[in-house]
Image (spheres, grey):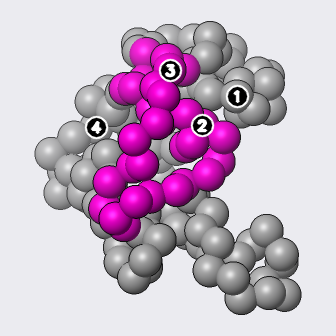
Amino acid sequence: MVEQCEQLVAEGVEFRGFCWFPLIDSTDWDTMLQKARGKIDPVGIYWLDQKKYRRNASMLSDSFRLLAQGKATSEDLPAYQFLPPVNEQLRGFLPQMSHWDWRMPPDIPVSVLKGAWSRTDGDTPKPTKRRRAGRLQAA
């Protein structure tokens, strides 16, 4: 998205910003908000801890802060390989991203890869087996 916004500005479009939804991880979307269980859906720029639902900065929030301050551009952002199931879901978009400098993502706990954001103390990922991410690529 950042790259496309920069292209709009380069083409002379008056562009002031965009909104990422949600800013903070969502909760209970797995039941379409019909049951208040407090289950976190990890889709926000800031992540929520399991115990007190505190907002925590992430690599993404740090990147957006630098972008907003004019201290970074799309070229400064890392492009990490897609993880399953996203690697299959977004396969058709790869040609649009072929010019990116792809990197292997940092080690990620297996529980996160499976979509289970289980945390022991609310601040750190639960110690689990670690593995490297999949074969396709993403930003």
Q: Which residue carries the number 3 mark?
A: 131
Query: Which badge, 2 or 3, comes first in the chain's sequence?
Result: 2
Query: Which badge, 3 or 4, comes first in the chain's sequence?
Result: 4
Please name which of the two marks, 4 or 2, marks the residue nearer to the observer: 2
Q: Which mark is residue 102?
A: none
Q: Would you call the spot at circle 4 few (<14 residues within 10 Å), some (14-19), or many (20 or more)? A: some
Q: Which residues are magenta?
A: 104-133
Q: Which residue carries the number 1 mark?
A: 84
Given residues 126 and 59, the one toward you in this image is: 126
C-alpha span from label 1 to label 3? 13 Å
The residue tagged with tag 2: helix, strand or loop? helix
Q: Which mark is residue 73?
A: 4
Please name which of the two marks, 2 or 1, marks the residue nearer to the observer: 2
The residue tagged with tag 4: helix, strand or loop? loop
Estimate the x, y position of residue 111 in percent, counting from the top left: 57, 42
Q: Quadrant of residue 15?
A: bottom left
Q: Look at label 1 and name its amino acid.
A: Pro
Q: Are marks 2 and 3 in contact (CB under 8 Å)?
A: yes
Q: Look at label 4 and name its amino acid.
A: Thr
Q: Which residue carries the number 2 mark?
A: 113
Q: Residue at x 65, y 48 (%)?
A: 115
Task: Please say if 134 is above or below 57.
Answer: above
Q: Is residue 19 magenta-colored?
A: no
Q: Would you call the spot at circle 1 few (<14 residues within 10 Å), some (14-19), or many (20 or more)? A: some
Q: Would you call the spot at circle 2 few (<14 residues within 10 Å), some (14-19), or many (20 or more)? A: some
